[in-house]
Amino acid sequence: MALEQKVEESKPAVNEGLLRQIDGIRLSPRLRAEREQFFAHELEITSDRAVLAMESWKETQGDVLDVRWARLVEKWAARLPIVIFKDQLVVGNQTKLFRGADPWVEYDAPNVVEVMEKDKRQIRTSAARVSGCEDEVWEAIEETVRFFLGNTPVDAMFRSLAALYGDWPEELEKARGTIRQGKYNLTPPTPDWRKLLVEGLHGVRQAAETGIERIRMGVEPEARKAWFWQAVTIVCDAAVRYAHRYARLARDLAENENNLARRVELEEIAGILERVPEYPARTLQEAIQARVIWGVAMQWCRPDHAVDESGRVDQEFYSYFIDGLRERRLTLEQAGDLIGTLLSNLARRDGVKSVQRGQHVQGTLHSNVTLGGVTADGRDANNELTYLILHMAGLLRYAEPHYTFRLRAETPGWALIKALDTNRKVGGGQPQFMSDDRVIAYLVEQGEALEDARDWAGHG
């Protein structure tokens, strides 16, 4: 069978008319204002998270470590300042500032010391970027760093190793035979976003309760697992309460809002937050809102890295997107606004990096959105939402999040051309292309329209 025929048969049944409509979408005033605000602000450092971390660590001294970390998340969920910015459509922010970051002192204190420039009261967040601190913030961070130095889980681990092996662990690290966690950054996990959307945290919590009950009944022989399951229930409840705090804030703002359209919008936001991420998402806005709240909660635990790896957004959100359009509960412009709001939220995620990481990461947190590729059953995965995400990325032109477009011989031409067009508009390798061995042959066979595609895909 000819390659061209294979490509044709592998194409999903996309709505080409919908693709043309997506090409006509422009940035809404809301997204344009967010973008202008982003580039008008420099990154600022806050100390709220660090102060609460120290407070919680003092309160939970002696507790089982799993539960201790969970109580820390609980403290952040209950006490971190929250804000809903003007005309924000999906809420949930890393800090109280539009562009803010918190040092990860409870695990990363040695790295924070290395990037604090005391003479100028600045914190270096990359090799080329520094952020100033107000005196109150600087002093609070300095106090928390002093508290955690020598008292992090990594310090405890190396003390235990030293008791067994003497100076061998330290010497092995100096010889680059190992990497000390907390001093160097690790690769973050990719969350199971589909599980969150389909089951909600209520479902995750129920599974944890079942685990605890199995231990109580003697069915589960490893009693230590009870601590982990207890921690899961604490964290799930904390994230739900965090969403409910935003719901109350949205309702308070709605009561004092003179603009009727915005008042209705705030009331809808409040209703959504009272449902997700606790329960399964039913609409695109609920799905994106659940993803943002849970992503923020995960970021508390790893603010120097993109813990909230965004996964395959065009697959996970597709049913919410296409069903909303078909059932006329969602317009294409509203879908574009929601996707753009998610990308804008990810663009503002930032952190205080180690010296080593700051030397090779000049941007924010490298949150990655994977597009295209294949489905679990081997079919081409490109769809109308893939196209919309690429389109909104091309309009917004943020350095983050990163986009990885999975390019195959069977990738349909409409998807590849859109990815190349987005790459031209954004620059900086957005999206970056990941391909298989047959791509060059495929591109050659596609004809004149793609004659320069090999260069764009990095195969020149």
Image (cartoon, helix red, strand yellow):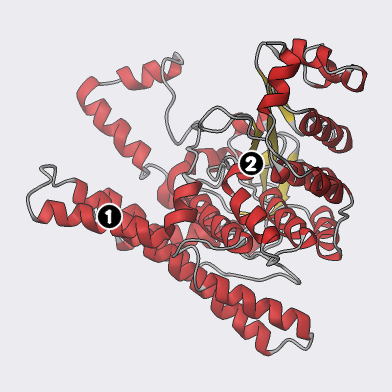
Above or below for 458 versus 252: above
Residue at 91% x, 23% y is 449
Say which label, 1 or 2, has the lower sequence index: 1
Above or below for 72 versus 175: below
Q: Can you tell which mark lies on residue 141?
A: none
Viewer-proximal residue, 420 or 104? 420
Asked which secondary structure carries label 2, the reply is loop
Q: Is residue 27 left or right of residue 82?
A: right
Residue tagged 1: 208
Snapshot quadrant of residue 237: bottom left
Asked which secondary structure carries label 1, the reply is helix
Q: CA distance from mark 1 to mark 2?
A: 31 Å
x, y (%) of residue 242? 48, 68
x, y (%) of residue 13? 70, 39
User: In the rendered image, which quarter contains the C terminus?
Assistant: top right
Snapshot quadrant of residue 456: top right
Within-10-Å neighbours for mark 2: few <14, some 14–19, many 20+: many
Viewer-proximal residue, 447 or 116? 447
Viewer-proximal residue, 286 or 332? 332
x, y (%) of residue 349? 65, 50
Amino acid type, callout 1? Ala
x, y (%) of residue 165? 24, 20
Viewer-proximal residue, 102 or 149? 102
Residue tagged 2: 365
Amino acid type, callout 2? Leu
Above or below for 49 versus 275: above
Please name which of the two marks, 1 or 2, marks the residue nearer to the observer: 1
Snapshot quadrant of residue 46: bottom right
